[in-house]
Amino acid sequence: MNIILYEPEIPYNTGNIGRTCVLTNTNLHLIKPLGFSIDEKAIKRAGLDYWKYVKLFVWESFDEFLEKNPNARIYYATTKTNKIYTDVKYEMNDYIMFGPESRGIPEDILYHNKENCIKIPMVKMGRSLNLSNSVVVVLYEALRQNNFEM
């Protein structure tokens, strides 16, 4: 599996997600600009001693990612769709993309990929779940569907 963080802003979230990726044998793709340095103490603290084992790919832009991964099947996690993340049949080489904590995936990306947008259901009072929690929810569903082949 592959997790894409589009312009992540908070190092602790990325560190937690990196730790999850190590323990699930999942690749982590970061799309720049990042709101922190990947050498920051905060990211390493959140990722604990797992950070050095993260299968990490850092891309200068989403366009560069798409150019280097032309056959990537990407699901876009957003609150702006009706399709629930469990309505999808995930394959082991799929990519699941999450946007920056403060604003989510840009509207133009979502607009051009409506059929692959997914959401985590929640009550209306909140905007969204924490990024690292959202990654875990969707990633583990994708892994469950694939018999936890890690």
Image: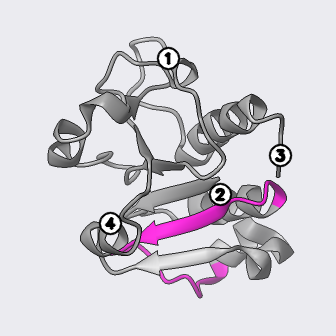
The amino acid type, in three-letter code, at marker 2 is Ile
Q: Hey, what amino acid is under mark 4?
A: Leu
Give the residue type at disc 3.
Glu
Secondary element type, mark 1: loop
Mark 1: which amino acid?
Pro
Range of residues picked out in magenta: 23-41
Residue that appears at 65% across and 82% down: 41
Dot 4: few (<14), some (14–19), or many (≥20) neighbours within 10 Å? Answer: few
**Which residue in the protein does label 3 denote?**
149
N-terminal label among 2 and 3: 2
Q: How many marks?
A: 4
Is residue 11 in view from this perspective? no
In the picture of the structure, the residue carrying the numbered disc 4 is: 66
Cα separation, mark 2 vs mark 1, equals: 20 Å
Q: Is residue 15 magenta?
A: no
- The mark lying in front, picked from 4 and 2, is 4
Q: Is residue 28 left or right of residue 125?
A: right
When the figure is inspected, residue 29 is found, relative to residue 83, above or below; the finding is below
For the residue pair 28 and 50, the one nearer the viewer reads as: 28
Q: Dot 2 corresponds to which residue?
A: 17
For residue 121, which numbered disc appears in the image? 1
Which of the two residues, 115 or 9, is positioned nearer the viewer here?
115
